[in-house]
Image (cartoon, rainbow, N blue to C red):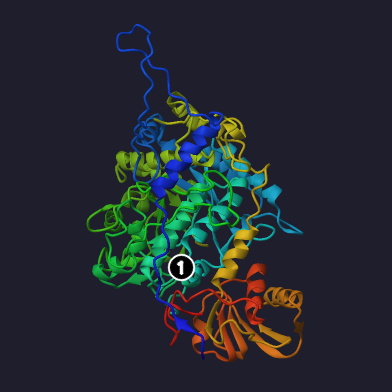
Amino acid sequence: MPQLSERSPEPSARFPRSLLAAAAAVTAAALLAGCSVLAPPQSSPSGSGTAPEATPDAPAPAPPRTSWGPLESTLEEAGAAVSGMTAEEKAGQVLVQFYSGTDPDRAIALAEQLHLGGSIIMGDNVPQNRDGVDTEALTATTHALHAASGRDWPAIVGVDQEGGTVARLRAPLTEWPVPMAFGAADDPELTARAQQAMATDLGVLGFTMNFSPDADVTAGPQDPVIGARSYGSDPALVAEHALAAVDGSLAAGVLPTLKHFPGHGSVTTDSHVGLPVQEASLEELRERDWGPFRAGVPGGGAGAEGTGEASGTGADGESGGEPGGGPGEAQGRLGEETGAPVVMMGHIAVTAVDPGVPASLSAAAYDVLRDPDAGIGFEGVAVTDALNMGALAETPGDPAVNALAAGADLLLMPPDVARSHAAIVAAVEDGTVPQERLDEAATRVVALMMWQEGLARGEGEDQGPPASTHGASDAAAPQEGGDEPAGSDAPADAAAPGSAVPGSAASGSAASEPAGSEAAPDSRPVAAEIAAAAVTVVDGQCGEPLVGDSIQIVGGNAQDRARLTDAAQEAGLQVGGGDVVTLLGTGARAASGDVVVTLDAPWPLAESAASSAKVALFGRTEESFASVVDVLTGDAEAPGALPVDVGEYPTGTGC
């Protein structure tokens, strides 16, 4: 049909994050100093007290920072804290528990008893009321989990909140389209703002970590578990948007996680139920799957074929859209020298690396992750995918011990956290796990959370009490989990509204009182912006009405049909007769209609028959349905482009 084109991806405008971060620091300092910048008093070299002539001050050199976020001094401080811990306390630092149901009492008790690093909130843990998520009850749960840690730095309270099919928290919180929507819109600045808005909502509820974004490069319809959770099939596009998402999340003070290394998008087995085997060569993996992860390491974006210049984009807040708000509002990451803080190791056996052994349990796979020459060069926190998944069902021994020994720092969702805690202590005592390995892992995790505290306060620097308070006495006081000089001079009330998190001076003492009392900025305008930007006409007339005055709606689920009905009627369309609009949701097969609309992954459009148009929507939110109605009526032209091949329609197809 006419009007369609295959769009070649064009380099998106990139903003130098180091300049943005520097501007943010100067602005923040000026505001905190009453909008004046004063030179510090100086004494004369002779000591006579005569003031020298005023000269412009040279900027102070930045304190040395790790490649993954925290200051080097914070890493040292964390090491001192860990050195004062007992074996039991150290073992707890590297464990993240899960629990069943909405009653967190047992989980709270275990967090205190076992000195756990944190907890993850899954879908069945989210309290509900008649409006959906009971945000007051949920915030009470996260407060209690933080208080149970007994530490002066925040606990990990994590969640899988990718948007779309993987979202543990839904209405009345803002709903987001699938991540592939961002690939279709291909606006990294928008990706950063959207992730910042989402993370700001999470921070207000007391979450400190999000097991997102997904950095997997999807191989297409043969990919059974990632699909539309990926930004697309081009490593450069995935890298750019994954790193933009990292920027946005860090700007809101919530720790992001790149997942699932060494790449889940190109295997054909779902690791929730079995062990995927990756047969690709190392050369193929470097060119495709590893590119986005290498781009997450400073200077690593050009080190893998296919990643181009992808290095992420800071949220600059100057586009005219509604910013997500929260700490570091306009800026994103702390500069180009800082990479992603956390990478998730997937349960994928890579034949070219360690045949038959899940990467999450493979020392060779962690070597690849850490090696800057042959692999990725990542120096931050390596977290496992959920250790209760089917991929590990046939592996002998305790999975937490095996993963820690192999090189993991953070052990997510062991089937029995108390048993794994005891097993780690025993393994260190008998030498199965060297003491140095546990110390290294615990130190990384503690440093990460000390850094998170400062991020969430909006200072862009590491926070935490004086080193003397980080002693041992303070430390004592079946789904995918990942899917899934310290201190600054800012006063205690410097946190942005809704951004105070556990352990910050803005939220109270120690780590017992996270945010939740102050509302975050409304994130729905950003959600509406991405919904509209993602709509893609794969086949059909662009900028013209695709339906008449009346439509029939078939397919989808009851909520999909109700939302499209509401949007259509709001636009003045009659619903119940006329042109057939067929909705295809997750797992749907090809279908027919006057207009066929996919709601998640677009691949069913390849074999579908449509007399008027085939449309990829990439979302099931109210904003998504309102956007597609605008396209159906001809009131808006679909701006999106396919980020994957769909049968005969190549990547880049769109209006």
Looking at the image, residue 637 sits to the left or right of residue 465; the answer is: right
In percent of the image, x 46 and y 68: which residue is there? 230
- Location of residue 50 by image quarter: top left
**What is the crowding at mark 1: few (fewer than 14 residues within 10 Å), some, or many (at least 20)?**
many
- Residue 644, position in %: x, y? 44, 76
Instruction: Please give the count of numbered marks on the rendered protein.
Output: 1
Looking at the image, residue 639 sits to the left or right of residue 94; the answer is: right
User: Which residue has dot 1 on it?
Assistant: 231
39 is higher (above) or lower (below) than 371: above
Dot 1 amino acid type? Tyr
Looking at the image, residue 629 sits to the left or right of residue 599; the answer is: right
Numbered disc 1: secondary structure: loop
Observer-nearest residue: 439 or 551?
551
- Residue 646, position in %: x, y? 46, 82
- Residue 159, position in %: x, y? 55, 54
Q: Is residue 12 visible?
A: yes
- Residue 279, position in %: x, y? 29, 73
Residue reaching furthest to the left: 373
244 is higher (above) or lower (below) than 475: below
Residue reaching furthest to the front: 53
In percent of the image, x 23 and y 58: which residue is there? 374
Q: Is residue 176 visible?
A: no
- Location of residue 445 by image quarter: top left
In percent of the image, x 46 and y 38: which residue is there? 25
